[in-house]
Image: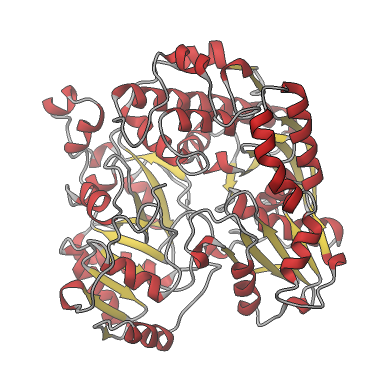
Amino acid sequence: MRVILGLSGLYHDSAAALLVDGKLVAAAQEERFTRIKHDSAIPLSAIDYVLEEASLSLSDVDAVSFYDKPFLKFERLLQTYIGTAPKGLNSFRMAMPVWLREKLFLKDYLANALKTRDEQFDIDKLRFVEHHYSHAASAFYPSPFEDAVVLTLDGVGEWATSSVAIGKGRDLEIVKQLEFPHSLGLLYSAFTYYTGFKVNSGEYKLMGLAPYGSPRFVDTILEHLVDVKPDGSFKLDQTYFNYASGLTMVNKRFCELFGEPVRQPDTDELTQFHMDIAASIQVVTEKIVLALARALREEYQIPNLCLAGGVALNCVANGKLIQEQIFDQVWVQPAAGDAGGAVGAAQAIWHNELGHQRVVDSADSMCGAYLGPLYNDDAIGAELADLGAIMQQHTQSDMLDTTAALLADGKAIGWFQGRMEFGPRALGGRSILSDPRNESMQKNLNLKIKFRESFRPFAPSILKDDVSEWFDFDAQSPYMLVVADVLDKHRLAESESQKNAFGIDRLNEPRSSVPAITHVDYSARIQTVDGAYNPAYHELLTRFKALTGCPILVNTSFNVRGEPIVCTPTDAFKCFMGTGMDALVIGNYVLHKSEQVVAAEDYTSKYELD
């Protein structure tokens, strides 16, 4: 038996992943255990979990692989400072203590941390894989393709910000890359910052805001900020940005270009201007991604494309890419951000260093992303009893019938079943569910349960065999990483008030027979569900369809704004009690809010806003 432990961390979204004889058996983000959103610490809790899941100890591990090469990243930091000095002095001085204390001597730092789990840990077991190679490996090796072009787009690794790799069998080679400071991820993050959202956290909010706006600044962006070549490669005009040398993403010249200052989230309202900015950078992002894809298909003549890196989580761009049919098939790593680098770092060692052959799964080898902790009914019941919960245990069939009936009755349900998901999406393991036909559900879920901005859209889970009957999409999207349009036959005729509405006011009018998941542009971020990896969720959708004729449920992550997705029964119960959820279904236990007697925590201010 050969065991490889992959790690990511020290920047954001730390994670651990475990390969046993080449099979991915467990993976989890550190944030789920520490309850610190985007936790960047060495993922000791996640390491404990993945080893426990495989009934192994750290001494059983043959190699520990980290998803980054710190000396190359430090080289970039030094060269960037030298190239911009003295302007970057403050950011350089702030970075140096952390680098000198931890990151520059990462091998020793990691080894000492791992020795808290095994005093005899051998430092020679440590390996370091380049950041973009880790991303590429995370996308290609689990994919269902024998060969593929692999496109990685993110903020920045060591030097690379965009890279192209070619995967064939067990071989994976990066063949070209674009380097810092020219970065599509940092460009998108600059606009995230400009509109008042947090970098490395709020990019998906910017994407969700875009449909409310008009892309009237596209020409401005393309004429001044980014020079896009016909092959999709690009350069950013650094005179408008501050991320290379300063402590902010954009500078005064950037703000003057668009005529507004950076939005202050605590005091400034979101206006139509910000929506138009969001729409514009989204269009530019899609133009670049599509141009890159067309050039890569023409150059390499390979029909399959794999995507990784934070930009691959832009599901609107993914939907456009699939719709254009540039590649015959597209597969996106479900943990496309830095957390997924832990998977890639482990698989790079298994296939590249150790030379093991690759076994291709016809679906993929990510196990539906259900790679986290599992709790049986005995463990759930004991934990809930200790919390003072009032609950009823059912057979699984009765639990499913009860849940389907509650959903059909308009209730919002906390749903905790099976193994926790790996990656940013809740996929029916740790989800909040509701009826998509309810016109007020989107606003209620956002304001009374998630405690977040009212404009944020919700995703539909749909039975895989029904997807083409409801959406302009005839494929599978098990990881909720593709946006597609609701079919005309399910849309409602546009009213006069809709035609005259602007911005957030467009939320107030239903647009389809499933208004809770239909965005203002008639799109939706789709999750297709089959019974292979999550039979309970598939069966719940089947029974809901039998009751209502609708094969769709609203599926949002089981957490509030700023909180990591729940991991344990205790996490689930506390979130259930502190929010407006009506019921909690956890294993075969059903809990009704009206029957609970324990005091609830104030969840409106428990977590720092993201």
Using residue 172 as the reference point, say whether residue 17 is left or right of it.
left
Residue 356 horizontal side relative to residue 510, left or right: right
Quadrant assignment, res 128: bottom right
Seen from the viewer's position, the closer of residues 351 and 122 is 122
Against 157, residue 86 (above or below) is above
- Is residue 162 visible in the rendered structure shown here? no
Could you tell whether 584 is left or right of 52 in the image?
Answer: left
From the top left corner, tell me how far across and down residue 560 is, in percent: 35, 56
Q: How many marks?
A: 0
Question: How did the renderer colour the structure?
Answer: secondary structure
Q: Which residue is nearer to you in this view: 586 or 175?
A: 586
Residue drawn at 27 percent across, 62 percent down: 602
Q: Is residue 601 above or below residue 466?
A: below
The outermost residue toward the left is 496
Residue 347 in the image, given as x and y percentages of width and height: 74, 59
Q: Is residue 367 above or below residue 49?
A: above
Res 348 → quadrant: bottom right
**Percent x, y for residue 539?**
35, 70
**365 left or right of 517?**
right
Find residue 254 and report its horizontal and vertical position in percent: 50, 17
Q: Is residue 210 visible?
A: yes
- What residue do we see at 44% from left, 63% from top? 530
Report the quarter where the N terminus lies: bottom right
Seen from the viewer's position, the closer of residues 525 and 392 is 392
Q: Residue at x 33, y 73 (%)?
A: 573
